[in-house]
Image: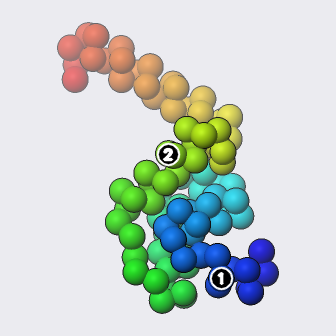
Amino acid sequence: MDKGEFTGHLRTVKSVVEHVLRTNKRSRGNDRLLIKEVEMICRNQVLRMPAHETITRCRRKFNADGRFLPEQKVLDQRRKRAGYMLDASRKGII
């Protein structure tokens, strides 16, 4: 997107999140980075800063639609971590 498109289309939280996810692939697997990028755009465009939950909710909606999925490496790490948590809960550790 060039600067003209950038200012015209980024008026909603969904459009800002979509822009960040499209242009920064690392933000697809890292909510902190996504939030930081969205905050920076909102400051530059003098837009109201959305709640962090709203930003991550938009990302999850895109993911549910099969768009802007994280890299396979990130998905594998999440599955591994979820397996550890499941084992710990079965053992009564957590």
Query: Which residue, given by chain and number where applicable, does mark 2 sit on?
Result: 60
At 58% across and 66% down in the image, what residue appears? 15
Image location of residue 36, percent across then percent down? 49, 69
Which amino acid, mark 2?
Arg
Could you say whether the residue bearing mark 1 is in a helix, strand or loop? helix
Residue 33 placement (x, y as % from top left)? 53, 62
Residue nearer the viewer, 88 or 51 = 51
Kind of residue indicated by mark 1:
Gly
Choose between 2 and 37: the one closer to the eye. 2
**The residue tagged with tag 2: helix, strand or loop?**
helix
Residue 56 visible in this rendered orientation of the protein: yes
Residue for badge 1 = 8
**Vertical placement of residue 93 versus 23, above or below:** above
Q: How far apart, in angstroms, are the residues tagged by discs 2 and 1?
A: 24 Å
Q: Is residue 84 left or right of residue 65?
A: left
User: In this rendering, would 65 be left or right of 53?
Assistant: right
Say above or below: 3 vs 62. below
Q: Earlier in the sequence, mark 2 or mark 1?
A: 1
